[in-house]
Image: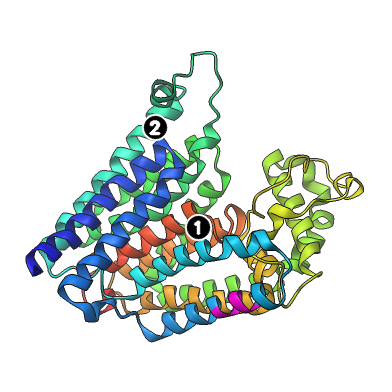
Amino acid sequence: MTGFAGGLRLWGLAAGFALFAPLGAVSHQAMAPAFLLPAAAILLAAGLSRPAALRPARGPLLAFLALAGWAAFTHVFAVDCAACAERAPGKLATLGLVAWAAASGAAALDGAAERRSAARALVGGLAAAIALMAVELAADAPVHRLATGLGPDDPVSPSRYNRAASALVILSWPAAAWLWGEGRRGAAAALVLAAAGVAFAGESLSAQVASILAVAAAGAAAVAPGAVLWTGVAAAAGFSALAPWVFLALPDWIRPVAHLLPGSAMHRVEIWHFSAGAVFEAPVLGHGFGAIRDFVPAPETLARYARLEEWTSHPHNAPIQLWLDLGAVGLALAAALAWFAVRPARGLPPPWRAAALAAAAATAFTAMVSFGAWQETWLGMVGMALLAFRALAPGPGAR
């Protein structure tokens, strides 16, 4: 049974690492099951062979239980949104699986040979996804057209690859750390640059900026990792706490240069401004999971915006969505959970520590400009990155 469980853990991780990015390049909806299935496999394997490994660390466990308890309290006693209450269990279950798989020992591999097999699967999957996206972006999506039956005159927007570009930028760092540790420093640098190149070839401005921030964070962390960690934590915490006030003032701040910004950026600014205003209607308790889906702005409200014509399913900013859905208390509890995800980077050896801080910088920036806090594809990206560091990094910091 132990042999079967060990194989299930290794091959579950390897399959997830190999398939996550290529499947995401084909269809971003595939990112959620491409994470959920390997995560379930490693938890099952741990349950069969070493049940003690299923026990998550106390800090992440308490933070998640507190967040889930607060969500339950608000949705039962304070939030008047039936659709929000229906969404809550699924969103919390996905977040809980991410936290459980990453904060327990279920993903920990037993030795260098197993880590090598899983790491090669990750590197191979990233290389395949980079090659696929390079072809798609350079040749007007031939694979997508073949798979969907679209004709040569049917338009395919490069934006359909934005989520895959973000995933490549983030996941390139654990793969690069393994390559660097194996003495293949040129391959490590090439992988990071290739992922960034795909981002710059597409339309994802957030992936482009995230790739630059990640390289800067990695370089600084090689010299002063503690300073990078605490600067990043302070910046993320400060911005998250002040987000409603920042976003209310943002349109006035950027008005002198608004004509220089791309339309997609101005669309985000308008969404953030509206969401920030809604935060102050329920700043402590929030409006409920995904409440922005159910808001129906008055015509005079929409008339204030130039680009906010069709309504949005999420605010494209994790901190403002946490404010909006769960209020200040929910934001604080989610911040504690995020801290427990980042904290193990302090104990990782070089080059893993620099790579973890680089991935954290890319993840934090992407969360603040692109995705909602509860999107399954986004949680899949974060979960797969956490599993990669958990499974592949050697030493006590990986456990």
Rate crowding at label 1 as few (under 14), some (14 to 19) or many (20 or more) other CA atoms within 10 Å.
some
Residue depicted at 10% across the width and 62% down the height:
4
Question: Which secondary structure is most common in the magenta stretch?
Answer: helix
Vertically, is 79 above or below 149? below
Q: Earlier in the sequence, mark 2 or mark 1?
A: 2
72 is within the stretch colored magenta: yes
- Residue 3 in picture, x, y percent from top left: 7, 65
Element type at mark 2: helix
Marks 2 and 1 sit apart, C-alpha to C-alpha, by 22 Å
Q: Nearer the viewer, residue 118 or 219?
A: 118
Residue depicted at 69% across the width and 78% down the height:
77
Q: Nearer the viewer, mark 2 or mark 1?
A: 2
State the residue position of label 2: 134
State the residue position of label 1: 213
Element type at mark 1: helix
- Residue 32 in picture, x, y percent from top left: 42, 51
Q: Quadrant of residue 139?
A: top left
- Is residue 182 visible in the rendered image? The answer is no
What's drawn in magenta, residue-wise? Answer: 69-73
